Amino acid sequence: MAALALGIAAAVGAFAALVAAPVLTLSPGMMTFPLLMALAAATLGGLTSRVGAVVGGLIVGVSNSLAGRYIPGLDGDLAIVVPFVITAIVVALAVAKPPQAP
């Protein structure tokens, strides 16, 4: 079952690359922004929780849109700062709390 899920994920990823490649220029940093958004969503929602990652994705997307709209200068290429800040805050808070005993 895991192999099937991996195969489906690879096929969807390949299709997404085929769709995005003509719009974006082919370069080594081609998918940097979507990858950073996904990393911020996964760290915010929890790396082991699918529902948490979806909720984290919604939070990251809405905060990115709101920051680009209401904070002057954060539109366009500078919008990549918002997922960086969210990831940094989540990691800093995760490191700050002591580990729990099993």
Image (cartoon, rainbow, N blue to C red):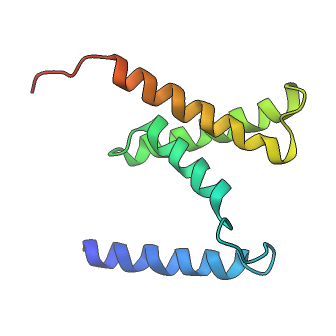
In the rendered image, the quadrant that contains the N terminus is bottom left
**Exactly how many numbered labels are in the figure?**
0
The residue sitting at the left extreme is: 102
Compared to 47, does 93 lie above or below?
A: above
In the rendered image, the quadrant that contains the C terminus is top left
What residue is at 61 percent from the left and 48 percent from the top? 37
What residue is at 63 percent from the left and 39 percent from the top? 83
What residue is at 35 percent from the left and 72 percent from the top? 5
> x%, y% of residue 74?
83, 35
What residue is at 52 percent from the left and 25 percent from the top? 89
Q: Residue 33, located in which quarter of the rendered image?
A: bottom right
> x%, y% of residue 90?
47, 28
> x%, y% of residue 3?
28, 77
Is 72 positioned to the left or the right of 47 in the image?
right
> x%, y% of residue 40?
54, 42
Compared to 31, does 63 lie above or below?
A: above
The residue sitting at the right extreme is: 72
The residue sitting at the top extreme is: 97
